[in-house]
Amino acid sequence: DAKTTQPPSMDCAEGRAANLPCNHSTISGNEYVYWYRQIHSQGPQYIIHGLKNNETNEMASLIITEDRKSSTLILPHATLRDTAVYYCIVRPGGYNKLIFGAGTRLAVHP
Amino acid sequence: DTEVTQTPKHLVMGMTNKKSLKCEQHMGHRAMYWYKQKAKKPPELMFVYSYEKLSINESVPSRFSPECPNSSLLNLHLHALQPEDSALYLCASSQGSGEGGELFFGEGSRLTVL
């Protein structure tokens, strides 16, 4: 499985956009980029995933570079409830294994 | 119903006890997972069941014994655990294989081994 690299921690002001980067330079053509988050003392929560095109849903946007070696998760208007650990994961399609890396601890402050 | 329900939420057991963790989902998912999470660490995959058959065992010690009685239920039987096995145990489910197979996680069972 391709490895990912994320900054260990980030800060964001409430109401501003939070941009969380992820490097996955060894990603293969059949591997998807997934983002999950884990709020303290809860189970991880799926956010979004993509293969090569940018994706948007009600929670976030995912921007994948053209060479697919990196991506950015965007929370457009961060709130205090978005304080969590965010995990970027690459995973082959049709594959049941989801392996978590260290993630980025995002702190949203007033 | 998009919930994965885990019981008990908290469990304290001695090293000679036998106990079980339970997980249930009613989303029609055919893949179910057990993860272990130590404090301030990411979840670590333990087992994957696909269509009620064990498909992945990440070299987990035999004192952890998974069981999938049917497509909605997943158990983790615990026996002769060590204090270092104390952790949050997370269950998850997904539709099965294929793109878009997001995992739905339960809230976890927090285990303390004395």
Image (spheres, rainbow, N blue to C red):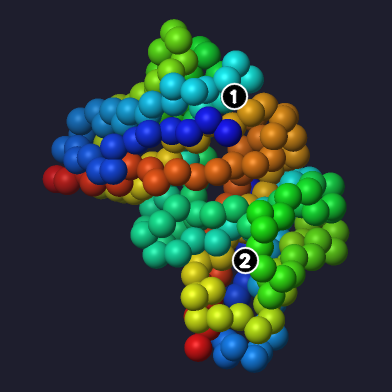
Q: What is the x, y in percent for residue A63?
A: 40, 18
For label 1, the SS is strand
Residue A73 at least partly seen: no
Q: Nearer the viewer, residue A77 or B90?
A: B90
Tag 2 subunit: B
Q: Quadrant of the N terminus of chain A?
A: top right
Q: Which mark is residue B16?
A: none
Q: Which residue is mark 2?
A: B6
Tag 1 subunit: A
Whether residue B23 is situated above or below residue A106 in the rendered picture: below
Please name which of the two marks, 2 or 1, marks the residue nearer to the observer: 1
Q: Residue at x 38, y 43 (%)?
A: A103
Tag 1: amino acid: Glu
Q: Are marks 2 and 1 on the same chain?
A: no
Q: What is the x, y in percent for residue A67?
A: 45, 10
Separation of residues labelled 2 and 1 (CA atoms): 30 Å
Whether residue B9 is situated above or below residue A84 in the rendered picture: below
Evaluate if marks 2 and 1 touch, with contact meaning CB atoms under 8 Å apart. no
Q: Residue at x 75, y 39 (%)?
A: B96
Q: Residue at x 28, y 43 (%)?
A: A8
Residue A92, by quadrant, is top right
Q: Which mark is residue A31?
A: 1
Q: What is the x, y in percent for residue A102?
A: 39, 46
Q: Nearer the viewer, residue A93 or B23?
A: A93
Whether residue A31 is situated above or below residue B79 in the rendered picture: above
Q: What is the x, y in percent for residue B3?
A: 62, 54
Whether residue B7 is situated above or below residue B17 in the rendered picture: above
Q: Residues within 10 Å of mark 2 (few under 14, many from 20)?
A: many
